[in-house]
Amino acid sequence: MPPVISARSYFIAFSTLVNKEISRFSRIWLQTILPPAITMALYFVIFGNLIGPRIGKMHGFDYMQYIAPGLIMMSVITNAYSNVVSSLFGAKFQRHIEELLVSPMPNLLLLMGFVAGGIARGVVVGVVVTATALCFTEIHVEHWFTTLAVVILTAALFSLAGFINALYAKKFDDISIVPTFILTPLTYLGGVFYSIDMLSSFWQTVSLGNPILYMVNAFRYGMLGVSDIDIGVAFAVILAFCVALFALSLWLLKRGVGLRT
């Protein structure tokens, strides 16, 4: 008969994994937290100061104000994804993931621990990038609940995506293929720098197939109160992707895909 494990033991296991993930990226903050702030500052200088005045206002906002939510969301997406994919693949490569697999820690808590670490890094970087944005433009949050909910759900979604990528990755090159050829194009075409109202009807329809468009617009609605997408539809899309990737991640863990040889 297997031993009975208390809820407190599960909590200790989960919190230990989360603390490990947070200390991992905070310990090397010069590589994980500072670069996004510098990158976003360059975006504001180039697109905001140099190109923005030629574009003019967009939905009643200065161009720099309009792109600020998209740039913040882009940093959250990138860092939440990178944190989990690099952490899990590193654990596989160094073979200390086996210690977690043989422990009585359930797959659910294992998954949630990695995802919580990704959310933490995404939120921390989002705050840092927001502080950077305030140096270039004014930001007034119109809907706090929507803003926070979108940030957390989006960070969770891409943490799950990074988890799945790391499970399938067999070498270091495999963890850079998805960000380079899928994540980056979708992000740049997700309405970060423009409104889809500027596109022709055909390309507007094509853009609706990009899930990042819904996240960027939901976050922009939370901060500025404007969106190209119905906010209810945006939340439905984000939640649907979160549930689907969460279920897929648990199923892959149960089957031991990428973890058992």
Image (cartoon, rainbow, N blue to C red):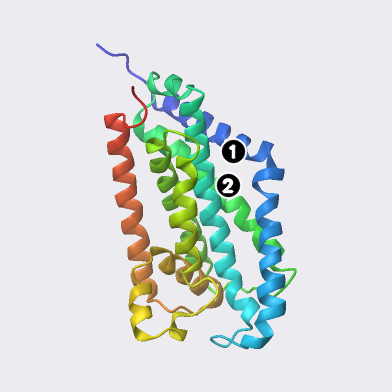
Query: Relative to residue 29, is residue 160 drawn left or right?
Result: left
Q: Marks 1 and 2, how far apart in space?
A: 7 Å
Q: What is the secondary structure assignment of the residue under circle 2?
A: helix
Identify the residue position indicated by label 1 in the image: 22
Q: Amino acid at mark 1?
A: Ile
Q: Quadrant of residue 60?
A: bottom right
Total residue callouts: 2
- Give how far across and how far down residue 49 sits, in percent: 72, 78
Rendered position, 196 above or below 128: below
Name the outermost residue toward the left: 1
Q: Residue at x 64, y 57 (%)?
A: 127
Rendered position, 58 above or below 96: below
**Quarter of the image with the C terminus in it:** top left
Identify the residue position indicated by label 2 in the image: 121
- Is residue 39 in sight in this rendering? yes
Q: Quadrant of residue 62?
A: bottom right
**Quarter of the image with the N terminus in it:** top left
Query: Relative to residue 138, is residue 97 drawn left or right?
Result: left
Label 1 crowd bin: few (<14), some (14–19), many (20+), radius 10 Å: some
- Give how far across and how far down residue 56 sits, in percent: 63, 88
Q: Quadrant of residue 169?
A: top left
Q: Residue at x 45, y 55 (%)?
A: 181
The residue lying toward the viewer, choosing from 238 and 191, is 191
